[in-house]
Image (cartoon, rainbow, N blue to C red):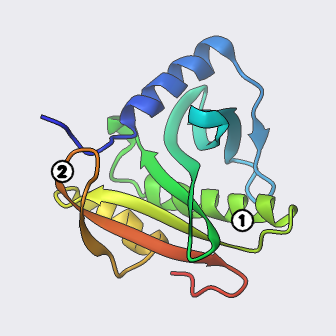
Amino acid sequence: MPQITDPMPALESFQKFFREEKPAVQPGTLDPEVFLFVDRVEEGKKRFAYFRHKRRTVTAFVMLVPADPYEGEHCVQLGWAVPPEYRGQGRAKELVAAALAEFKNGIARSGITTFYVEAIVGADNEPSQHVAAATISNSPSKVTDKASGLPALQYLGKIGTDADEP
């Protein structure tokens, strides 16, 4: 049975890559304990992977991938994952907020001051719902996940100089 896209496999893959390949990563501009790795995914789109680590163990992971524009503005899809041993400590909420601030700061240099962020969260995933409500929007829309056909919540928020941020 199909499932809602889970960012945990991306975290696991990145963890292996981070340990074995030791890629060049950039520390955050606003928070030097947040690190950024940029690569390209489908159709040449950039994927922005923000993470925190402790002795080369990723403790929280956030991905931002450009999506189709929303209401004429840039839009990114957001996903996050935390290894089981680090859950329940507020790491996801903290890193999502830090990643969005870093991303906003980074794209502002190219003249983009406002963008939308979207997260699709399973209707049964209460921990991620709390993260999304605290960092993106506290007014989700009920949707059916396109990939799995399962009930989900869409969190959509506008971030930028003229946006009402959560």
Residue drawn where x is 53% and y is 27% of the image: 14
In the image, residue 80 above or below residue 69: above
In the image, residue 58 above or below residue 152: above
Mark 2, mark 1: which one is toward the viewer? 2
x, y percent for residue 41:
59, 33
- Quarter that holds the N terminus: top left
Q: Secondary structure at mark 2?
A: loop
Q: Which of these two is toward me, 118 or 60?
A: 118
x, y percent for residue 99:
62, 56
Q: Which of these two is toward me, 77 or 53?
A: 77
Instruction: State the count of labels.
Output: 2
Instruction: Please tell me in which quadrant of the rendered image residue 126 appears.
Output: bottom left
Residue type marked 1 = Lys
Whichever of labels 2 and 1 marks the residue nearer the N terminus, that label is: 1
Residue drawn where x is 81% and y is 67% of the image: 108
x, y percent for residue 166:
51, 81
x, y percent for residue 46:
67, 41
Q: Which mark is residue 134?
A: none
The residue labelled by disc 2 is 149
Task: From the viewer's perspective, tell me whether residue 89 is left or right of residue 75.
Answer: left
Residue type marked 2 = Gly
The residue labelled by disc 1 is 104
Task: From the viewer's perspective, tell me whether residue 8 is left or right of residue 117.
Answer: left
Q: Label 1: few (<14), some or many (≥20) within 10 Å?
A: some
Residue drawn where x is 16% and y is 53% of the image: 150
